[in-house]
Image (cartoon, rainbow, N blue to C red):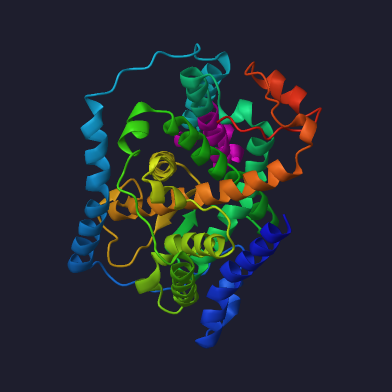
């Protein structure tokens, strides 16, 4: 536990301090990076470039084609699994509440005007419930019901997690918000509430995907990938990714993809150097199921994020150098590739949080799960210590 706490402290210092150190060394005024709420736009982005767009498209296709081909290769050999349970009533409640929130988010009813900017959270709470209901129907268990202590801890952790990416965005300014006219306090609480749904959503989708036969068969038994000198490799990756993170504010047009890649590599490198298990270790035995489910979960959630954002009053828009064309909703098409490493980052943070919740759970309570009876079980759960039992 002490080693984990020490690593977390070092990690936090690196992730927050390195970008700021980079712009300080470049002689920039750091006050603009700390403006709150962030209003000023001070990064002038490079225009669209066909060579960069073509190269980026080729890289994305090179990564996705093997992924898709493996899924298609096993699809014809899969047998449909019967549902373990009926779709629960609270899943239907999530569907109806989500549809209602969707209508309110995309309409402009005069009577709803005071609450119009606040539709993001109800939409995502509904989706989280529905995905857990799908998992419960398919395998008889779900993250929300089987690991309630961990599930509830995801919400505050998620808010802190996404605030970090908002901080990194200050150095590249790849997205900005419109339709939001809040003071500092209101902006903080509104954003924190919205950000709290990111980890629960992605991890709930991941847990549902992990049990699907297509994921189970397509990404197990891969060719093992082993690193012969793992500590040396981890040290080299740590240095390079830290240098990249330090430079994102100095060369934002060229290093902006590292906003999504460097934090992941820094965390994994530190885990490898300190002897902690990390998300890439399964590749050594040819198991890519966790990686595939994590990346796909973030991409699915990303599709919903961008779709629901499109006609909402309070929304975000993008300013991405070199590739800022051919949008699907507000997001440039190539921008969706960023969700793939983001899904791995979500899984990494989820794993760290699960280690903490497991270590701090009362031993007598581990292994306890709540009923899937719905909100009443959540209320009863809050009256006693949470459980962090694994559903696997």
Q: Residue furthest right?
A: 383
Residue 129: give x, y in percent of width and height: 55, 27
Q: Is residue 19 above or below residue 11?
A: below
Residue 41: give x, y in percent of width and height: 47, 69
Magenta-drawn stretch contains 297: no
Can residue 95 be spotted in the picture? no
Residue sitting nearer the eye, 242 or 112: 242
Q: Quadrant of residue 118?
A: top right
Can residue 291 be spotted in the picture? yes
Q: Is residue 152 left or right of residue 134?
A: right
Q: Residue at x 67, y 57 (%)?
A: 4
Q: Which residues are magenta?
A: 105-129
Magenta-drawn stretch contains 116: yes
Q: Quadrant of the C terminus?
A: top right
For the stretch drawn in magenta, the main secondary structure is: helix
Residue 189: give x, y in percent of width and height: 67, 50
Q: Quadrant of the N terminus?
A: bottom right
Q: Residue furthest front?
A: 228
Q: Residue at x 69, y 60 (%)?
A: 3
């Amino acid at each position: 536990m002490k080693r984990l706490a020490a690593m977390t402290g070092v990690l936090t210092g690196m992730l927050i301090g390195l970008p700021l150190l980079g712009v300080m060394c470049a002689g920039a005024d750091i006050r603009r990076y700390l403006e709150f709420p962030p209003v000023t736009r001070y990064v002038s982005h490079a225009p669209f470039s066909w060579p960069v767009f073509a190269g980026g498209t080729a890289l994305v296709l090179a990564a996705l084609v093997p992924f898709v081909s493996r899924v298609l290769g096993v699809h014809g050999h899969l047998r449909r699994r019967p549902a373990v349970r009926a779709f629960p009533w609270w899943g239907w409640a999530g569907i109806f509440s989500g549809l209602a929130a969707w209508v309110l988010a995309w309409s402009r009813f005069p009577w709803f005007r005071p609450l119009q900017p606040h539709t993001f959270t109800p939409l995502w709470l509904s989706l989280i419930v529905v995905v857990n209901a799908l998992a419960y129907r398919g395998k008889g268990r779900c993250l929300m019901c089987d690991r309630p202590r961990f599930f509830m801890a995801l919400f505050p952790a998620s808010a802190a997690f996404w605030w970090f990416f908002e901080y990194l965005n200050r150095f590249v300014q790849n997205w900005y918000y419109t339709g939001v006219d809040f003071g500092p306090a209101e902006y903080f609480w509104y954003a924190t509430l919205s950000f709290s749904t990111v980890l629960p959503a992605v991890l709930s989708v991941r847990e549902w995907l992990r049990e699907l036969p297509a994921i189970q068969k397509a990404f197990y038994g891969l060719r093992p990938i082993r690193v012969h000198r793992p500590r040396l490799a981890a040290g080299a990756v740590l240095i390079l990714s830290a240098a990249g993170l330090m430079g994102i504010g100095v060369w934002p047009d060229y290093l902006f993809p590292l906003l999504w890649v460097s934090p992941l590599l820094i965390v994994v490198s530190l885990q490898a150097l300190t002897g902690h298990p990390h998300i890439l270790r399964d590749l050594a035995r040819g198991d890519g199921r966790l990686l595939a489910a994590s990346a796909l979960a973030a991409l699915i959630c990303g599709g919903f994020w961008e779709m629901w954002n499109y006609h909402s009053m309070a929304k975000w828009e993008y300013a991405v150098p070199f590739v800022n064309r051919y949008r699907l909703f507000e997001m440039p098409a190539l921008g969706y590739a960023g969700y793939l490493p983001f899904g791995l980052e979500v899984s990494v943070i989820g794993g760290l949080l699960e280690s903490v919740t497991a270590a701090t759970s009362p031993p007598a309570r581990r292994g306890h799960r709540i009923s899937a009876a719905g909100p009443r079980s959540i209320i009863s759960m809050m009256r006693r210590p949470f459980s962090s039992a694994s559903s696997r």
